[in-house]
Image (cartoon, rainbow, N blue to C red):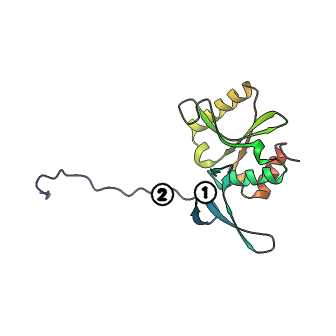
Amino acid sequence: MPKFAIGAPALPKARRLKTAPKPFKFKIIRPVGAGIVARAEAPGGTLMEESMVINGVEAQSVNEWYIYKALTMGGIPTHDIDYQVPWHGGRSLGGQVLDFVVTIGGLPFVIRVMGKYWHSEPITSALDTFTYGQMVSEGLSVHDIPDTAANSVDAARHALIQEGILR
């Protein structure tokens, strides 16, 4: 017969949640006021630390940060790059948060970073296809870049050149 304390309900033992593996390849040094600090090695062999903040918003993934760095190094001013833009309600039902909306010459276009974590399930793939069609029907130019094509700033720059965004 199981033993119970008098007056206390029998509760199941709490399970430990398994944490998902980190998909990023950078090392987090320490939290800072408005983001996290990443460490990278410069071509000369010196270590550089940089806060991963995009226009005042903490980068949601290292791949998005690499794309932002590639855009700015490619000559696009930071004031022409909007990050984490709510579209049709943002995170509410029927909406979406666009990774980047870049305005060059008055014409905005969308860059979506398609990572395995958020975009690999059948329901999210169907939603991505639906919202892609919706954005195109509204006159937006949409560029989907897989996260595997943005593993570094150079790789992100190459992906943006292939998409016709950078030269």
Q: For residue 26, what is the image quadrant? A: bottom right
> Label 2 crowding class (10 Å Cα cut-off): few <14, some 14-19, many 20+?
few
Q: Looking at the picture, does residue 144 appear above or below residue 156?
A: above
Q: Could you tell me which secondary element the residue under label 2 belongs to?
A: loop
Q: CA distance from mark 1 to mark 2?
A: 21 Å
Q: Nearer the viewer, residue 28 or 30?
A: 30
Q: Furthest residue to the bottom?
A: 45
Q: Could you tell me which secondary element the residue under label 1 belongs to?
A: strand
Under mark 2, the amino acid is Thr
The x, y position of residue 56, in whole percent, is 65, 50
Q: Looking at the picture, does residue 42 appear above or below residue 4?
A: below
The x, y position of residue 102, in whole percent, is 76, 40
In the displayed structure image, the side of residue 45 where residue 49 appears, left or right: left
Under mark 1, the amino acid is Gly
> Label 1 crowding class (10 Å Cα cut-off): few <14, some 14-19, many 20+?
some
In the displayed structure image, the side of residue 69 where residue 131 appears, left or right: left
Q: Looking at the picture, does residue 110 appear above or below residue 157?
A: above
Residue at 53%, 33% in the rendered image: 92
Residue at 61%, 43% in the rendered image: 119
Residue at 61%, 35% in the rendered image: 96
The x, y position of residue 80, in whole percent, is 77, 42
Q: Furthest residue to the top?
A: 137
Mark linked to residue 91: none
Residue at 58%, 48% in the rendered image: 117
Q: Quadrant of the N terminus?
A: bottom left
Mark linked to residue 35: 1
